[in-house]
Image (tube, grey):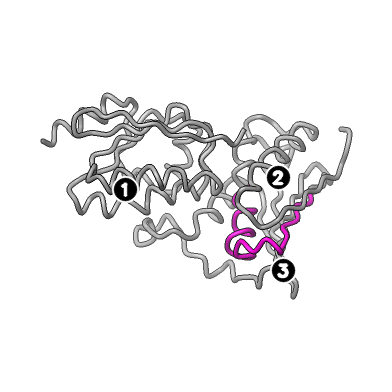
Amino acid sequence: MAEFSTSIKDQGNINIVYLKGFLDAHTAPSLENTFSGLVDKGRYQIVVNFKDLAYISSAGLGVFMAFIEKIRENNGDIKLSSMSDKVFNIFDLLGFPLLYEIFKTEEEAVKKFNEIK
Amino acid sequence: MAEENYSLEIESNPNNLITVEEFVNYFAKNIGIPEARMNGLMLSVTEATTNAIKHANKCDESKRVKINVKVEDGKVIISVIDEGVGFDPLKIPDPTEPENLLKDSGRGVYLMKFYMDDLKYNVTPTGTETILVLNLNKQA
């Protein structure tokens, strides 16, 4: 356990980031690197797919907070999708639905970006 | 129940959270903690340990974090002991207040309070003990 990995799929201007495994204080730097890489390339439209994320701690949640302001300043957004109930409950408990759009499916999140164009 | 007491001691490096996660799985299985409470337990122990490693011991590997677990009167009592200078829990902001949503502090303590049946601190001259209590008779 405690393994974590990310993978990225480009879909036009939108980048879909897939999370897998355990996102905690040990593995959070890996997600920071992924977001930094996207921001450095000017890729500000991001969908994060949580389907294979088993666990998230507050250090993992903090990564989303660290990047959201810069991304929104550049007319982008991070939209979240496909969370298990277990992971969604933690986001919900901490008030994240006020800050982030959370979708049932990746397709709905992508569609929302395309509607804005 | 094979054992009533469990303990783990780690250096203050976030890489050691893997060991802590394995430790939680090990004692939870032995004690028979219900599956419905496992996520909250894992989250609470790793949040307390992360605070101890990062905020109290400042990731100084010469400082240790000790985790002691005991079962007593139907309760699992988990102590996470650091070597830091301590803090005032009353000064931790509520992370769910709109003005604090983007701030990075307070989320771990908030989660521990939510998932555990009791959360206490014992500040001593040599460090802080964070005490998590899970009542085995209570449903999630």
Q: CA–CA distance between discs 1 and 2?
A: 31 Å
Which type of secondary structure does the marked residue at label 2 adopt? strand
Q: Does the segment drawn in magenta span residue A73?
A: no
Left or right position of A50 against B31: left
Q: Are marks 3 and 2 in contact (CB under 8 Å)?
A: no
Please state the chain letter of the residue tagged with numbered disc 1 in the rendered image.
Answer: A
Q: Where is residue A95 in the image (x, y as percent from the top left)?
A: 39, 48
Q: Is residue B127 above or below residue B72?
A: below
Q: Amino acid under label 3?
A: Gly
* Mark 2 lies on residue: B134
Q: Earlier in the sequence, mark 3 or mark 2?
A: 3
Q: In which quarter of the image is the C terminus of chain B?
A: top right
Residue plotted at (51% across, 65% down): B92
Residue holding disc 3: B127
Image: magenta residue range: B45-68
Residue type at the position of mark 2? Leu
Mark in front: 3 vs 2: 3
How far from the left and from the top, in percent, is residue A75?
A: 17, 48
Badge 3 and badge 1 in a common chain: no
Q: Distance between the residues labelled 3 and 2?
A: 23 Å
Label 1 or label 2, whichever lies nearer to me, is 1
Crowding at label 2, few (<14), some or many (≥20) Cα neighbours within 10 Å? Answer: many
Horizontal side of residue B49 vs B68, given as left or right = left
- Judging from the image, what secondary structure is the residue with disc 1 in? loop
- Residue A103 percent coordinates (x, y): 32, 31
A3 or B134, nearer to the observer: A3
**Quarter of image, res B89:** bottom right
Q: In this view, does A38 lie above or below A67?
A: above
